[in-house]
Amino acid sequence: MKCALPPLQRRKKVRSNDSEALKKYLEARKKIVDEALERYVPGVDAYPPSLCNAARYSIFAGGKRLRPILCMAAAEAVGGDSDAVLPVACALEMIHTYSLIHDDLPAMDDDEYRRGRLTNHKVFGEGIAILAGDALLTEAFCLMAAVGGSDGEGLLTVIQEIARAAGFFGMVGGQAVDLESEGKEIDFETLRYIHTHKTAALLQVSLRAGAILAGAGPQELARLTEYGAKIGLAFQIADDILDVEGDVEVLGKETGCDGERKKATYPALMGLEPSRAQARELVDQALTDLSPFDERADPLRMIARFIVDRTS
């Protein structure tokens, strides 16, 4: 499949501070991302059908699209056009989806449900699930490499940063330490390493990618990087808390799995209330990082608050 990039239309930005505005903003951006992914991911008639259908099964399973939305919001926060970063934003979602497919495998977390549906390997088998994840990861870099424009150096930097955030020194590295830490007593620094690499790294680079492609200045980029590190860690702490007290129907997957597997989590090491307080403190710090930005960064402010208040 050729990685051709279709033309995109400019869309109206949404800015407000209330929760209803955030809901509308997220829904609108999710729709944009979903429509783009329909163009970028091989269709139901593509060959081989088992591989393409498996990839589509997971990528269109109803995710929040948080990483591509952060990429787009960061571009807007520094005065850029979110449409211009949409291919990279979609590539980030492909990488995230591949990681979920692989995380659910019996050799990893051995999960049966995700987002209220059977996990990929339960539907298509372990072999095709592995290959579907591999295909999405590879296609993500094909998509980014096909992006046009005059800032080739900026795009190269973004591709390199995303690769690093997804590989040895990012998401995959964090997953490896997480896997090896199951059933063991680990210290707080190891737990923080797992969370900042397995989860926060891809969230943080989503912001950096959008900002770099939109021409952010050094100070803007530094502040968005700090914001990303803090909301990324807060996001995973919130996930840990939801595994303890979340609603199965809302989450779309079983709860209590971390405890059963004896995974290292913030609630396990700190307790629920201290973990909740830590997440909120991180969000407060992230909001401070955004203080020099004008109202164009309001979606990022709302997303930070949403991270600790969410139920799924």
Image (spheres, rainbow, N blue to C red):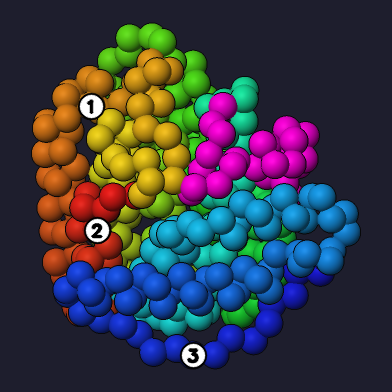
Residue 310 visible in the snapshot: yes
Residue flagged by tag 3: what amino acid is it?
A: Arg
Residue 280: which numbered mark, if any?
Answer: none
Q: Residue 205: within the magenta?
A: no
Q: Residue 117: within the magenta?
A: yes
Measured from the top left, where is residue 251 in percent x and y?
A: 38, 46
Magenta segment, which residues? 110-135
Q: Earlier in the sequence, mark 3 or mark 1?
A: 3
Asked which secondary structure carries label 1, the reply is helix
Question: What residue is shown with label 3?
Answer: 10
Left-right relation of 245 to 131: left
Question: What residue is shown with label 2?
Answer: 306
Asked which secondary structure carries label 2, the reply is helix
Question: What residue is shown with label 1?
Answer: 267
Pointer 2 and pointer 3: residues touching (CB < 8 Å)?
Answer: no
**Within the image, what quadrant is residue 57 found in?**
bottom right
**Within the image, what quadrant is residue 221 found in?**
bottom left
Residue sitting at x 51%, y 59%: 62
Pointer 1 and pointer 2: residues touching (CB < 8 Å)?
Answer: no
